Amino acid sequence: MRIQDPHSEWWARRRNSRALAAIALAAALAAALPAASAADDGGLLPARARELAYLVRQDCGSCHGMTLKGGLGAPLLPEILAGKHEDALAAIILDGMPGTPMPPWRPLLTEAEAAWIVRALKEGLP
Ligand code: HEC
């Protein structure tokens, strides 16, 4: 069931054109590759995407810095993450980094949501 979202227009206005282009591309890919679309962020409702963006700023930001420029945890800015593999980053988010304070988020996030966060971080969080 899809719940009517009073903030969706506000959210849509906040997206920059680069994000819109990425979404259009993702939608085109999802249409072209139906088998892959279930794991893509096409499966995330806007309300869940907004929750995840909030989680990244608040919870991840508590260690990685509110602007993700780094703190106890490494910076999570697009230019820093550009060379890093998406699957490896998603695995770190889901399972943490043993020996560091980076905790595992698997109890709270699905694999699709971790992949969404990696893409959001690489593109610059909305
Ligand atoms: C309790 C503190 C803490 C929290 C909360 C936390 N992290 Fe981390 N994170 C760390 C530390 C410490 C590292 C390791 C930094 C290093 O390389 O020494 C790390 C590493 C990472 C890395 C690897 C960075 C790289 O360049 O390889 C990613 C990606 C990451 N965290 C994402 C997240 C995300 C997404 C969240 C929220 C869902 C999160 N972290 C929450 C402490 C935290």
Image (spheres, rainbow, N blue to C red):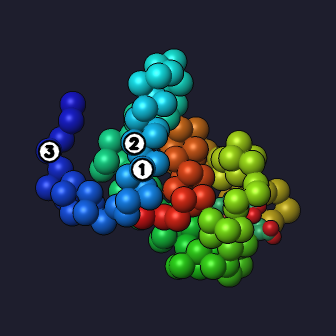
Front residue of 121 and 98:
121
Q: Earlier in the sequence, mark 3 or mark 2?
A: 3
Label 2 element class: helix
Position above or below: 33 against 20: above
Q: Earlier in the sequence, mark 1 or mark 3?
A: 3
Q: Are marks 1 and 3 in contact (CB under 8 Å)?
A: no
Q: Residues within 10 Å of mark 1 (few under 14, many from 20)?
A: few
Distance between mark 2 and mark 1 Cα atoms:
5 Å
Label 1 element class: helix
At 75% from the left and 48% from the top, the residue drawn is 85
Can residue 2 be seen in the rendering of this structure? Answer: yes
Q: Describe residue 3's horizontal placement relative to residue 113 as left or right.
A: left
Task: Give the residue number, with chain letter if any, for mark 3.
Answer: 4
Task: Give the residue number, with chain letter if any, for mark 2.
Answer: 24
At 58% from the left and 44% from the top, the residue drawn is 115
Q: How far across and down, in percent of the image, does residue 6 sit?
A: 14, 55
